[in-house]
Image (cartoon, grey):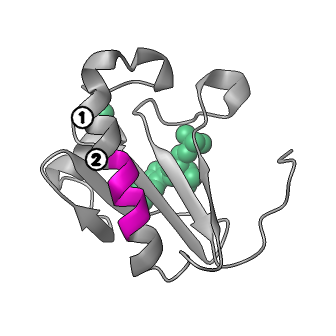
Amino acid sequence: MDCIFCKIVQGEIPSKIVYEDDAVLAFDDINPEAPVHVLVIPKKHIASFNELTAQDGELLVKIMESIQRIAILKKVDQSGYRIVNNCGADGGQTVGHLHFHIMGGREMLWPAG
Ligand code: 5GP
Ligand code: ZN
């Protein structure tokens, strides 16, 4: 499958890994929009938020816990941060492998454009 995030999981494309466990990988975004901009992905290929099911409950808890850990590692847990999932074309999704953006280190604007 031609998926850049699967290739990052396989180590075929290098990335700056921030956190990793058996099910989750997190790495710095290549084009950061904020001083802290980390992508958190499931290691298994899930195309988008639309494809999540109740079977992924354990995985989602791991993603949630990894986000909390990354916020501490990146020292934005107290200052605050934003978690974003872009789903589909209008959502602005450009990579077809589920990912959550963690953004912080500056005040994030709201509403997003
Ligand atoms: P989306 O627009 O799908 O929500 O977010 C995709 C994100 O992946 C973008 O913020 C983009 O900068 C990032 N990205 C795309 N290709 C790569 C890559 O090869 N390495 C890393 N680290 N980030 C990437
Ligand atoms: Zn993939």
Residue receiving disc 1? 58
The number of discs equals 2
Res 2 seen here: no
Q: Please, what secondary structure does the residue beneath circle 1 have?
A: helix
Q: Residue at x 28, y 26 (%)?
A: 56
Specify start and end residues of the magenta stretch as a single range.
63-69
Q: Please, what secondary structure does the residue beneath circle 2 have?
A: helix
**Residue 19 position in % (x across, y down):** 28, 66
- Which quarter of the rendering shows the N terminus? top left
Q: Residue furthest left?
A: 22
Residue receiving disc 2? 62
Q: Is mark 2 within 8 Å of ligand 2?
A: no
**Residue 17 position in % (x across, y down):** 29, 68
| Most foreground residue, 38 or 63 | 63
37 over 91 or under it: above or below: below
**Residue 76 position in % (x across, y down):** 56, 77
